[in-house]
Image: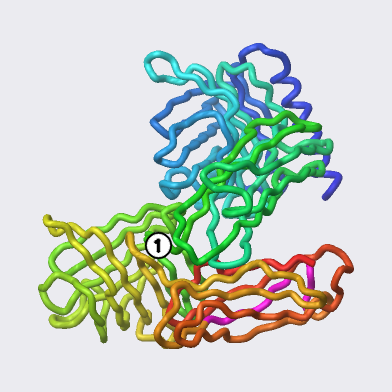
Amino acid sequence: MRLRITLVILSLVSLFSSVASGATQQTFLTLISQPGDYIGQGITQTLTPADGTFSVSNGSNTVSISFNSSSQFWFLDFGTPIAVKLSLGEFDGAQRTAFRSPTRAGVDVSGDGRGCNTDTGRFLVSDFALNPDGTIARLAIDFEQHCEGAPPALYGSFRYKSSVAAVPRVAIASTYTLKGNAGTSDALVTLSLCLPSTSIVQVTYATADGSGVQGTDYLHTTGRATFQPGITSQTITIPVVGDFRARGNKTFRVKLSAPSGAPIGASTANVFIRDPNMPVTVLAMSSQPGDYIGQGLQYLITVSDGTFTPTNFANVVSFYINNGDNWETDFAGPTTARLGPGNYENAQRYPFQPAGTPGLSVYGAGRGCNTLTGNFRILQAAYNTSSVLESFSANFEQHCEGAAPALFGWLRYKTKLQQFSVTDAVIKGSSAVFTVTLSPSNATSLSVDFATADGTAIAGTDYVATSQTVTFSPGMTEQTVTVPLLKPGDTSKTFYGELSAPNGAAVWIGQGSATF
C-alpha cells in the first residue's frame, strides 16, 4: 500500500508540473483520488479546455465550477463562511457546501454520478480576481476532500485563467478555542499542505499578540513543523490561559515563516478565544447511553459553530440552530401566557401536548422523537417592547419515546452559563494533576464524572487509569484529580482527562491533556 500511495503522489507531482509550470495563464482541473475514495474511484487525471467545457460562476461567498464532456461530468462547489467573502487564504474544517453551517467553509466535489452525503475537507485560494461586472477573472483553488468522513482523500487543483502553479503549499487557517477557568487548555491549530508532497516540508510557526496578550491570555509558542511525504495536515498545540474573570473574548495570531520544501500559501491565522464567564449563546447537551437523540454523546455548540435563530409567539420560544446538523429546541408553557421563568414539569412533545400541559421538543441531526416526556426550567426570558425575545436561559431533560435514558441540556441566548471545565495537567514528580472547575459556584452540590483516556500514553503501561465522580459542595469552584504516572520522564507521551455525565451544569471544556 505504501508503494501504491507513493506512486500516486509521484503521478500527482508529474501532472502538476506538466500543466502548471511557468507563468502562462491556464485553465485546467486535476483530480488525484486515493485508493478507496468514492468520488474519484482512484483516478489520476488532468482535464483541460481541449477535453471539454468549463463553466465558472460565483455568489457572494460561493464558487461553482463544472466540467462537461461527452464522457465526463464534474461539479465543484466551494464556499466560505456566510459572513466572509471569498478571498485569498486557507479555509479549513469545511463541510459539504450546500449543507454547511453558516460559520464554516464548504467543499463539495462530485461527478460521473457519484456524490457525498457528507464530506469534510479544506481548500486554499491562491489566486482570485473579479471582472468589472463581478464575474470571475482568475481563480486558483487547491483542495482536499474526504467523502463520508472516510480517510481516503480526493486531492485536486482548479485553475481558471491563472498562472499560479499547482504545487504543494503550506498554509494555516483561522480557528477558535475555549478559555477555561484555571491553568491552561489546548488551542489546536491546523497546519496543512494544499497538495501532497514527495519530499519533506518544514515550516516555522510562532504566536503573536492581537487583542489577546501572551502570558495573560495565551502562552507564547514557537516551533518548526515537519510534514513527511504524503502527509497533508498536522496539529500544533498552543496553551490558552484560564481564569474565573469575565475578561471578554480575545484573539491572537499564529504566523508561518522560513518554509523548506514548499512555498507558503497562507502565512497568518487568527485564533479566537471564547470566554465562558461572559453572556454567551450556546447549546450544551449531555446524552445518556441509549438516548436516541443525542446518541450517548456530549455536545457544545457555540456561535462559532453555527447560527442561533430564535422565534417566539404567545407561550412558545423556539431556537433553530444551524451547525450543519440543524438542531431545534421548542419550549411551550401550559397556558397562553407568555413563557417566563419557572419550572415546567411533566412536559410532552411540542406541538402535540394536551391542553394545559407544557410542551418540549429537542431534535436534530435527522433524529426526532415520536413521543417524549420531560421537564424544563426557564431561568431567564426577557422581551423587548415589541415582545421579541432579547435573552433566554433554559435547562431541560428529555426522554424519547418514554425511555429511561435522558438527554440533558442547557440553552443560553445572550446569558451566562454555569459550566464545568478541566485543565491540562500539571506534572508533579510521578503524578499528573488535573484541575476541574465549576463557574460560578452553586448553592447546592453539583458533580461531574472524570476519566482518563489513552493518547500516545497507554493506561497500565504509562499511567494508572483513573475515574471518579468530582463533587462540588456549595460555594466550591475547584477540585483536583491526581493520576499516577508509571514511567515519568521516559519519553514524551500524552494522555487525557475527560469530563462526562454532568449533574446540574454544562460541560464547557471536556478534555485536558497530560504530557510527560
Instruction: Identify the residue shown where x is 18% and y is 61%.
Output: 383
- In this view, the residue in front, 345 or 53, is 345
Q: Amino acid at mark 1?
A: Val
**What kind of element bears circle 1?**
strand
Residue 93, image x, y percentages: 56, 48
Residue 311, image x, y percentages: 23, 59
> Label 1: which residue?
282
Residue 117 visible from this viewpoint: yes
Residue 78 vertical position relative to residue 392 in the rendered view, above or below? above
Left or right of 399? Residue 349 is: left
Instruction: Identify the residue shown where x is 72% and y is 32%.
Output: 168
Q: How is the structure coloured here? A: rainbow
Q: Quadrant of residue 111?
A: top right
Report the number of discs: 1
Q: Residue 88 magenta-drawn? A: no
- In this view, the residue in front, 232 or 249, is 249
Residue 165, image x, y percentages: 68, 22
Numbered range of the magenta stretch = 448-459
Instruction: Identify the residue shown where x is 61% and y is 27%.
Output: 29
